[in-house]
Amino acid sequence: DSLYILKPDGDYPELPANEHLTMTAARRLSFDVPPTGLISIEGIGLVFVIKRFDRITPNYRLLSEDMAQIYEEASDDKYSLSHEKVGQAILEHTQAGPLNLNDYFRRILFCFLTANGDMHLKNWSLLEMNKNPGVFRLSPAYDWLNTRIALPQEKDELAIPLSGKKRNMQKSYFRRFAIDELGLKEDYIEKVFAEVPIWMRTLKELIPHSFLSEKMKKAYLDVLQQR
């Protein structure tokens, strides 16, 4: 019945500090991010903490379904579908579907910039609205971190295809996807692209003050510049 999820270091280096930095930047940039924190536990080290968005109180839970559940895909098949399929589910199952698709596109671009190569089906989900039971929206962000600095040998830039592509992504691919697949308006698309320099400045301000090692700070900055 806990209202929080605790994530200690795992098989890859500095994950708690990595996720804390990325989620902190996302919140500062007005993405929908739950309360998060970073704590130090003796004998364990740094632990990333995030408040559960599907539990209002221990006895009051909101229904949340990720895209693997929605499409009845096994957890092992979480890389099986595409960004197009995620967009279709958002449009079909959420209130104000087009507005949720605007948010979806903005999130895709931010995750690409921050080298999050693991946004698979289980990292996109829909959440029941607290004041409107049975009505859904795109859930708050979770599992946002820079996978490339944790896994330098990672080849794909996206976990699931976007317009049939997962690597060597270009601005034109994202624009065409937003127009052809999501039906977004050109002025909104350009507005999101115009945010990217602001995202870069914010990340560059936060990285030096993060809990990453100096080596990882440099790696994060380097991959940002590449993207």
Image (cartoon, helix red, strand yellow):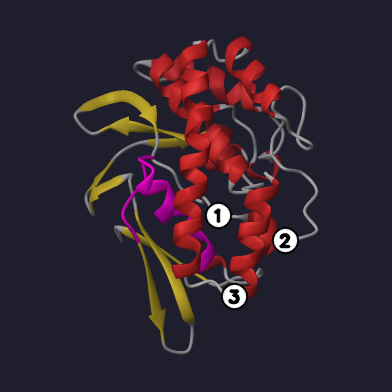
Quadrant of the snapshot with the N terminus: bottom left
Residue drawn at the location 58% of the way across and 35% of the way down: 68
Question: Of callouts 2 and 1, which one flags the residue occurring earlier in the amino acid sequence?
Answer: 1
Q: What element carries label 2?
A: loop
- Mark 2 vs mark 1, CA separation in Å: 11 Å
For the residues carrying marks 2 and 3, which lies nearer the camera in this image? Answer: 3
- Mark 1 vs mark 3, CA separation in Å: 17 Å
Q: Find disc 1 in the rendering and name its residue.
A: 145
The vertical placement of 115 against 9, above or below, is above
Which x, y percent locates residue 121? 60, 37
Q: Is mark 3 on a helix, strand or loop?
A: helix
Numbered tag placed on residue 151 in the rendering:
2
Please name the predominant secondary structure of the magenta segment in the image: helix
Find the magenta span and give its range.
17-36
Quadrant of the snapshot with the C terminus: top right
What type is the residue that disc 1 sits on? Leu
Question: Of callouts 1 and 3, which one flags the residue occurring earlier in the amino acid sequence?
Answer: 1
Numbered tag placed on residue 214 in the rendering:
3
Residue 119 is drawn in which quadrant? Answer: top right
- Mark 2 vs mark 3, CA separation in Å: 17 Å
Mark 2 burial class by Cα count in 10 Å: few <14, some 14-19, many 20+: few
